[in-house]
Amino acid sequence: MVEKLKEQIYIIPLRDVQHTPRWERGKRSMKAIRDYLARHMKSEDIKLDQNINEAVWERGSHKPPSRIRVRAMKFEDGQVQAELAEE
């Protein structure tokens, strides 16, 4: 069984995504979330929960949220699993 090493809640800013063309903002938001978690959790193996995807794409690709609250868990094997944090 793989043990959990670290659990952290992050508020990921997505404001910079607004500088990309409208039709690319949803896709760019997902990439920004992965990049943020890779940088802060020091791992390249990032698994995002479906609820994060639904929250980003809820208003379509043109209007993603300006920030998102995520709970990230890092395991012994280096894998990071992220899920939408409850408010």
Image (cartoon, rainbow, N blue to C red):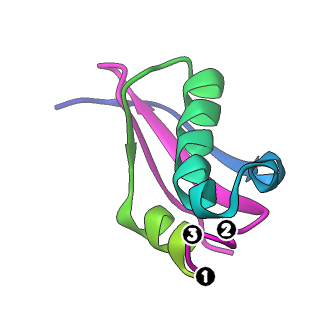
Q: Is residue 86 magenta?
A: yes
Which amino acid type is shown beneath numbered disc 1?
A: Arg
* Residue 59 position (above or below residue 40): below
How would you rate the neighbour count of disc 2 (Cα within 10 Å): few for under 14, some for 14-19, many for 20 or more? Answer: many
Q: CA distance from mark 3 to mark 1?
A: 7 Å
Is label 3 in contact with label 1 (beta carbons under 8 Å)? no
Q: Secondary structure at mark 3?
A: loop
55 on left or right of 2? right
Q: From which residue to which does the magenta span run? A: 60-87
Residue picked out by circle 2: 64
Residue picked out by circle 3: 61
Q: Secondary structure at mark 2?
A: loop
Dot in front, 3 or 1: 3
Residue at position x 36%, y 65% in the image: 50
Residue picked out by circle 1: 59
How would you rate the neighbour count of disc 3 (Cα within 10 Å): few for under 14, some for 14-19, many for 20 or more? Answer: some
Residue at position x 61%, y 72% in the image: 86
**Residue 67 found in image quarter:** bottom right
Residue 87 at x, y percent in the picture: 69, 75
42 on left or right of 76? right
Q: CA distance from mark 2 to mark 3?
A: 6 Å
Q: CA distance from mark 1 to mark 2?
A: 6 Å
Which amino acid type is shown beneath numbered disc 3?
A: Ser
Is label 2 in contact with label 3 (beta carbons under 8 Å)? yes
Q: Secondary structure at mark 1?
A: loop
Is label 1 in contact with label 2 (beta carbons under 8 Å)? yes
Residue at position x 38%, y 58% in the image: 49
Which amino acid type is shown beneath numbered disc 2?
A: Pro
